[in-house]
Amino acid sequence: MTTPDRPSSPAQQPSSGKPSEASQASVPSESPKAVKPVYKDRVYRSPFGLVGGVLLLGVLGWLGGDAVVSGEGRTPWLALASLLLAVPLVVAFSVRPAVFANDDRLRVRNPFRVIDLPWAAVVSLRSGFSNEVIDEAGAKYQLWAVPVSLRARKKAARRQARQAHAVAKGDSSGRTSLVDASPVRAETDQVMADLRELREARAKATGSQGEPSVRWAWEVMGPAAAGAVLLAVLIALG
């Protein structure tokens, strides 16, 4: 059986001024500062808008490219000006719109503006004939990326009615119905419900405080305006 080592006498200890390993181990090392985890944004887009926009861009590219290559006289210049005007607008209204949501804020990217809203600045998320977010100043911003579909709402209502009928039928027969009784919503209405839940959960958080900010999308408006001016000049020159 091994016995613990006896401590050496002071005379036997080294006389160097360096602290011993034991003393170094006893000094707690500085712990790194806690880093707040960064979560990815939830991104909401309109799939029909994306598909339609890509198809329309393809048609514009085909027709415009053919006019530029095969056109004569002022036709190539008119085609280029028309493309410079049309392409940014198609991108703005179909591909660009998106809604980004995380634990701290809601960012709405509309055709010509980007609205940054901390959750504390969001008063309500309203669904009617369009989906809107309202800030503490009373300003309303439409969610272009989350359009309202009346057809989807009617379809969800019919499905909800069928489920309610099945549940009632099962209760009247004395058997437990296996039908899910949770509310049935249209896809965009479900998105709005998820955003409301996130707002209620995070509105009082420290990272969710701040003021709303709105930025104009000059990267879209600039080329479109240049294309409109160029097209007007070419038409005026005859």
Image: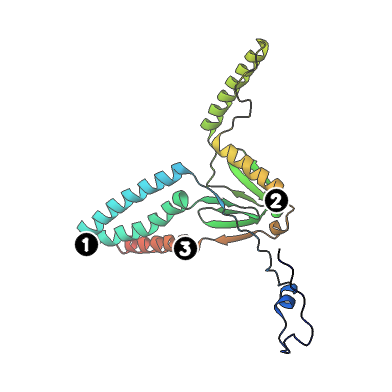
- Looking at the image, tell me whether mark 1 or mark 2 is earlier in sequence order: 1
Q: CA distance from mark 3 to mark 1?
A: 30 Å
- Give 162 or 14, whichever is nearer the viewer: 14
In the image: residue 176, left or right of residue 151: right
**Can residue 133 be spotted in the picture?**
yes
Q: Position of residue 117 (x, y in %)?
A: 64, 55
Q: Position of residue 225 (x, y in %)?
A: 44, 62
Which residue sits furthest right?
10
User: What residue is drawn where x is 49% and y is 63%?
Assistant: 218
Amino acid type of disc 2? Arg
User: What residue is drawn where x is 72% and y is 87%?
Assistant: 14
The residue that mark 1 highlights is 73
Q: Position of residue 197 (x, y in %)?
A: 67, 43
Mark carried by residue 202 = 2
Give the quadrant of residue 158.
Answer: top right
Label 3: element kind: helix
Camera-side mark, 3 or 1: 3
- Looking at the image, tell me whether mark 3 or mark 1 is earlier in sequence order: 1
Q: Are marks 3 and 1 in contact (CB under 8 Å)?
A: no
- Tell me the quadrant of the picture where the C terminus can be found: bottom left
Q: Is residue 144 above or below residue 209?
A: above
Amino acid type of disc 3? Glu
Amino acid type of disc 1? Gly
Label 1: element kind: loop
Camera-side mark, 1 or 2: 2
The residue that mark 3 highlights is 219
